[in-house]
Image: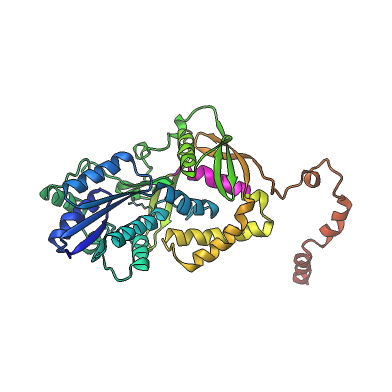
Amino acid sequence: MPKTVVLVYSGGLDTSVCIPMMREDYGFERVVTVTVDVGLPPEELKQAEEKARLLGTEHYTIDAKNEFVTDYIFPAIKANGDYQGYPISTSIARPLIALKAVEVARLIGGTDAFCHGCTGKGNDQFRIEFVMRALMPDVPIIAPMREKTLTRSWEIEYAERKGIPIGQSKEKIWSIDENLWGRSIEGGRLEEPDYAPPEEIFKWTVDPKKAPDTPTEITLEFENGVPVGLDGKRMSGLELIQQVHKIAGANGVGRVDIMEDRLIGLKVRENYECPAAKTIIPAHQALEALVCTKEERAFKVLVDQKWGELAYAGLWYDPFKDDLEAFINQIQPRVTGTVNLRLFKGSCTVIGRASKYALYNEDLASFDSRTFDQSEAVGIVKTHGMQARMWRTVMDK
Ligand code: ARG
C-alpha cells in the first residue's frame, strides 16, 4: 500500500504548498485532495480542481451545499446561531468539511494521515481536528503551517520554486473564507481594531450609502423553525438562502465588524458579510417572540448562547449540543408563520409577524377592549414589588 495522506484542500496558497511538502518532507507517495463545496465561488472551485490536476493529486470535489443547508445552517437558524455578534458561518462549515474528508478516507481505505492548512492561531484547527479525531481517532493529523510556522512570503517563494501557480496570491492581502451563510475577511491592516475597513473588502453587500433610496419589503415564511418560502413562493432552503442573500446584499444588509475572542484566547478584529443570515435570523427571532412564553424566551436566549459557543468551537458531536437541541427543537414546530421585513440602506427591520400559534390575543391586549376587567389589576398592582418596598422600610430604620 502506498503511504497515503488525505488533504483538506481549498486550492489556496496554504493548502497548495502542502502538496509537494507532503511528498518531499513527509514521504507520502499518494496525496489525496478533498475540496468540499459549501457554497464556494465557482471559479475558486474550478481553480482548485485544475491545480490539483496539475500537481498530480488524486482529487475529489464534493458538492455538500444541500447537506450544509439542512444539517448545519438550519440548526443554526433554529438556535439563532451567533457568537459575539457574528452569525457563525465559517465555524459551522468546518465540521462538514472535515466530515467529508473522513468519508473520503473511509472510501479509499488505507489512509495513513490527514493534513490541513490551518495555522496555530486560528479557530479552524480546533474544528477540523475535533471531527477527524472523533470519527477516525487512530489517524494522525499533520498541520504543516502550524508545525513549521511558515510565513506567507516564504510560502509564495516556495510555491514558485515548486512550480505551483499562485495566481494573484501575491497581491491578495486579505484572507477570505466564503460559504453559503457568510463571508469572512481577515488579515492585513484589518486586524487593527481601529482601522476602518476599506470598501474594497466587500463583495456581497453594497455600500449602505449607495443602496437604493426606496426600501425593499419581503415576506419570509417559516415552518418548524426554518424558512420555506419567500414572498409567497415556496422554495428549497438552498434557493431561499441564495435569493435572500441577493436582495439583502443589494440593500447593504449584512455587514458585521466585531472584536472576537478566539478559542486560543486571542482577541481579534473580524469583518463579515452575511446578508442572508442577518435577515433570516432576526425574522426567526421575531417569530419566536410571538409564539413562545416569557419564560421560554428568557431561557432560550441562554440556550442559544451556549449553542453558539459550542458551534463556534466546532464541537459538533458534543452531547451537550444534543441536550441544547432537544430544548430548541421542542419549541420549533410552533415557530411557523410569516414575517415581513423592510430592508433599507444597511438595516433590516421586522415590520410584521403572524402565526397560528401566536400567544397574542387582540381582544385581551387592545386598549379598546373590555374583555379583560381592568379593575382586577388593582390588587395585582398593589402587591407588585412588595419585598422591594419592604426593604426600603427596613433600610430607613
Ligand atoms: N473568525 C471566524 C471564525 O473563526 C472566521 C475565520 C475565517 N477563516 C479564514 N481563513 N478567513 O469562524
Q: Which residues are magenta?
A: 274-287
Compared across the picture, whether 124 is left or right of 350 comes to left
**Could you say where residue 123 lies in the image, as x and y percent from the top left?**
36, 59
Q: Is residue 142 among what the camera can see?
A: no
Compared across the picture, whether 61 is left or right of 255 comes to left
Q: Quadrant of residue 326?
A: bottom right
**Scheme of colours in the image:** rainbow
Residue plotted at (34% across, 41% down): 41
Count all numbered tags in the image, as a single digit. 0
Q: Nearer the viewer, residue 292 or 309?
A: 292
Magenta span: chief secondary structure: helix
**Could you say where residue 241 lies in the image, as x and y percent from the top left?**
47, 42
Q: Quadrant of residue 98?
A: bottom left
Residue plotted at (89% across, 52% down): 375
Quarter occupied by the C terminus: bottom right
Residue plotted at (67% across, 48% down): 290
Quarter occupied by the N terminus: bottom left
Q: Nearer the viewer, residue 392 or 312?
A: 312
Q: Looking at this rendering, what residue extends furthest in the left direction?
A: 161
**Could you say where residue 295 lies in the image, as x and y percent from the top left?**
67, 60
Q: Is residue 180 among what the camera can see?
A: yes
**Could you say where residue 164 lies in the image, as x and y percent from the top left?**
16, 47
